[in-house]
Amino acid sequence: MKIMHMLGVLVLVAALALLALGGVGYNGQRGLLDAITAQFISSDALRNHMQADMMHDALRGDVTAALLAASTHDDNAIAAARTALGEHAGDFRASLAANRKLPLDPALRKDLDAVTPALQAYLASADHVVKMAETHTDNPAA
């Protein structure tokens, strides 16, 4: 075997090894990129969920404030509770909508869709209680 022939085979083997190494590296980078993308989506979903949870607490506080204001016949405080309820309900809905826009796992999306009617009913009941406080300020049981 001539030296030129052996060098050609050696160069070919080295080129194939470099291509294989490049393919493995590219595949590893793609896997990392997919994992990072999934992590960003998961982080966004968790942030939206935590924001919605905080708004749930704020809604409960708004309803409690309206009931307290109704028991003391404080129309200004009832109006403030109504304003706060509107803001917090809007933020709550925005957080839920933000999660619906994310490319979530189908099982998670199904679970989120399943609780949506209960969440809408929660918002409606909070609004109803504040309306009762607004219209029945003489009734402490409102």
Image (spheres, grey):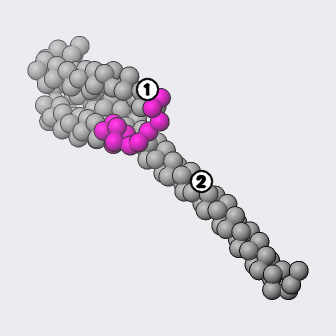
| Image disc number at residue 16 | none
Residue 51 lies, with reference to residue 14, above or below; the image says above
Q: Secondary structure at mark 2?
A: helix
Estimate the x, y position of residue 114 in percent, counting from the top left: 38, 22
Q: Quadrant of residue 28?
A: bottom right
Residue 22 is left or right of residue 137, and the answer is: right
Seen as rendered, the residue at the extreme right is: 1
Marks 1, 2: nearer the viewer: 2
Sort mark 2 into few (<14), some (14-19) or many (20+) by Cα contacts within 10 Å: few
The stretch drawn in magenta includes residue 122: no
Quadrant where the N terminus is found in the figure:
bottom right
100 falls in the magenta region: yes
Expressed as whole percent of the image width and height from the top left, the position of residue 109 reads 41, 31
Q: Quadrant of the C terminus?
A: top left
- Decide which of tag 1 and tag 2 comes sooner along the chain: 2
Q: How many marks are shown on the rendered structure? A: 2
Specify start and end residues of the magenta stretch as a single range: 95-107
Q: Position of residue 66 (x, y in %)?
A: 23, 28
Residue 35: x, y in percent? 56, 51
In the rendered view, tell whether residue 79 sits above or below residue 7: above
Q: Quadrant of residue 69?
A: top left
Quick one: SS at disc 1? helix
**Could you tell me if residue 84 is visible in this image?**
no
**Residue picked out by circle 2:** 31
- Name the residue that disc number 1 marks: 111
Q: Label 1 is placed on what type of residue?
A: Asp
Query: Which residue extends farthest left?
Result: 135
As rendered, which of 16 and 71 lies closer to the eye?
16
User: Which amino acid type corresponds to the residue marked 2 in the rendered image?
Assistant: Gly
